[in-house]
């Protein structure tokens, strides 16, 4: 009777090279320095919210939420994206 092996959890899918728009986003984040870029800045460069979410889900970027005062002194919450070590490795 054959012995059954315990099942292993599937490895997360990590593409060898990120998609071209993700590479462009990583290059932009790497150029922003240690502070990173805000989501509106990334959106002005043509990235969609889904693309930015994919970047975070893949572990290439990390987000933090900041409170800022906008025009007319209204409080705004803005997400700031920063490149991670995994993002640096994927870019290089």
Image (cartoon, grey):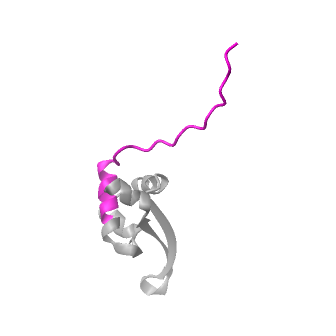
Residue 76: image location, x then y, percent: 49, 77
Residue 66: image location, x then y, percent: 50, 76
Tell me which segment is drawn in magenta: 1-28
The question of residue 19 being in magenta is answered with yes
Q: Quadrant of residue 45?
A: bottom left
> In this figure, what is the number of numbered marks?
0
Left or right: 25 with respect to 78? Answer: left
User: Residue at image x 38%, y 68%?
Assistant: 40
Rendered view: 16 above or below 71: above
Q: For this rendering, which residue is in front, 84 or 57?
A: 84
Dominant SS of magenta comes to loop
Residue at the far top: name it.
Answer: 1
Dividing the image into 4 quarters, which one contains the C terminus? Answer: bottom left
User: Residue at image x 46%, y 55%?
Assistant: 53
Residue 79: image location, x then y, percent: 47, 69
Residue at the far bottom: name it.
Answer: 73
User: Residue at image x 47%, y 41%?
Assistant: 13
Residue at the far right: name it.
Answer: 1
Rendered view: 55 above or below 11: below
User: Residue at image x 60%, y 38%?
Assistant: 9
Dividing the image into 4 quarters, which one contains the N terminus? Answer: top right
Residue 8: image location, x then y, percent: 61, 35
Q: For this rendering, which residue is in front, 41 or 34?
A: 34
Q: For this rendering, which residue is in front, 10 or 27?
A: 10
Q: Quadrant of residue 28?
A: bottom left
The question of residue 33 being in magenta is answered with no
Rendered view: 5 above or below 16: above
Left or right: 52 with respect to 27? Answer: right
């Amino acid at each position: 009777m054959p012995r059954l092996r315990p099942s292993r959890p599937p490895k997360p899918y990590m593409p060898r090279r990120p998609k071209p728009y993700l590479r462009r986003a990583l290059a932009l984040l790497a150029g922003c320095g240690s502070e990173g870029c805000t989501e509106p800045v990334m959106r002005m460069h043509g990235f969609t919210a889904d693309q930015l979410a994919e970047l975070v889900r893949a572990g290439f970027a990390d987000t933090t939420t900041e409170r800022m005062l906008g025009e007319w002194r209204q409080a705004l919450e803005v997400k700031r994206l920063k490149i991670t070590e995994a993002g640096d490795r994927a870019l290089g």
